[in-house]
Image (tube, helix red, strand yellow):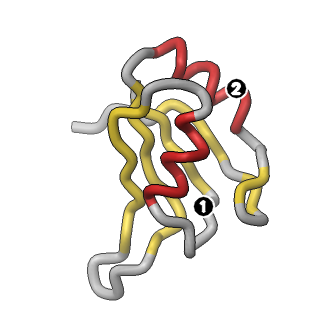
Amino acid sequence: MVLYVGNIYFGLSENQLREVFENYGKVESVKIVKDNETGRSRGFGFVNFENSQDAELAKNELNGREVNGRSIIVNYASKQG
């Protein structure tokens, strides 16, 4: 189950984001989207959980929570393609 995470502090690393979400279950992967030209964070990313129950818990607990001074937005990632 993949969660979209928005309004991420631009200096936050993928490892730091993983640490926030690992409190709610087994995280398979974390990806912060970066600008192709500058390599800087675009302020959003994705966290992939091993199971949907952990993802649901993380979404409910972390949506609106402050991380590094910013209230993050957590929702289910929409499927594209």
Q: Quadrant of the C terminus?
A: top left
**Residue 79 drawn at (x, y percent):** 33, 32
- Which picture quadrant has residue 40? bottom left
Q: Amino acid at mark 1?
A: Ile
Q: Quadrant of the N terminus?
A: top left
Q: Amino acid at mark 2?
A: Asn
**Residue 49 drawn at (x, y percent):** 42, 28
- Contact between marks 2 and 1 (CB within 8 A): the answer is no
What is the number of the mark on residue 8? 1
Q: Residue at x 56, y 73 (%)?
A: 10
List the single residue furthest toward the bottom.
38
**Residue in the foreground of this view, choosing between 47 and 25:** 25
**Residue in the foreground of this view, choosing between 44 and 58:** 58
Q: Which residue is mark 2?
A: 60
Q: Residue at x 48, y 35 (%)?
A: 3
Answer with left or right where residue 42 lies relative to residue 73.
Answer: left
- Classify mark 1: helix, strand or loop: loop
Rounded to the nearest angstrom, the CA distance separating label 2 from label 1 is 17 Å
What is the number of the mark on residue 22? none
- Which picture quadrant has residue 23? top right
1 in relation to 42, above or below? above
- Classify mark 2: helix, strand or loop: helix
List the single residue furthest toward the left.
81
Indicate which disc, 2 or 1, sits on the residue closer to the N terminus: 1
